[in-house]
Image: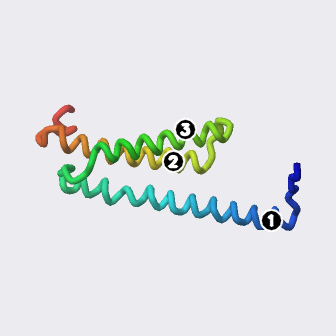
Amino acid sequence: MNAVMPTAATAAPRARSVSLLSGAFALFNSLRIVAYLPTLLAIQASGHADQHSLFTWLIFAGANSTMALWLHEQNGRRTNRAVVVNAFNALMCGAIAASIAWWRWVPPAFSFASIL
């Protein structure tokens, strides 16, 4: 076998590349978490969820949940930034799905004040 051993000259650019890629991942996925807020607020403000697909948001929640779990397993059952970001994405997708379901199936006259 002709295995090429990394040298200090090749390791430094790779480490910089991985660091930049990790930072970009964190930045864009954090922005994605924030980007869920307008959808969630629009559903709450309008009280209408017919224009949003509950099925799609449940799939997104499932995809992000399973990705977080897969990353956790691949990382030796340790939590890292990628696991946390995917878990938060799943949480936000779940919140949107719950909001859609709430506005579709809970009677408008129902409120938390009425159950107290």
From the viewer's perspective, tell me whether residue 115 is left or right of residue 61: left
Q: Name the residue under label 1.
A: 12
23 in relation to 84, above or below: below
Q: Mark 3 points at which residue?
A: 69
Q: Sort mark 1 into few (<14), some (14-19) or many (20+) by Cα contacts within 10 Å.
A: few
Say which amino acid is labelled 1: Ala
Q: Position of residue 21 (x, y in %)?
A: 63, 62
Q: Which residue is drawn at 53% across and 42% down?
A: 68
From the viewer's perspective, tell me whether residue 6 is left or right of residue 114: right
Task: Give yes or no for contact between labels 2 and 1 (Cβ–Cβ under 8 Å).
Answer: no
Say which amino acid is labelled 3: Leu
Q: Position of residue 22 (x, y in %)?
A: 63, 59
Q: Mark 2 points at which residue?
A: 86
Mark 3–mark 1 Cα distance, whole angstroms, equals 31 Å
From the viewer's perspective, tell me whether residue 68 is left or right of residue 17: left
Say which amino acid is labelled 2: Asn
Question: Tag 2, which secondary structure?
Answer: helix
- Residue lying at the far left in this picture: please name it: 109
Question: Tag 1, which secondary structure?
Answer: helix
Q: Where is residue 41 in the image (x, y as percent from the top left)?
A: 29, 56
In the picture, the quarter occupied by the C terminus is top left
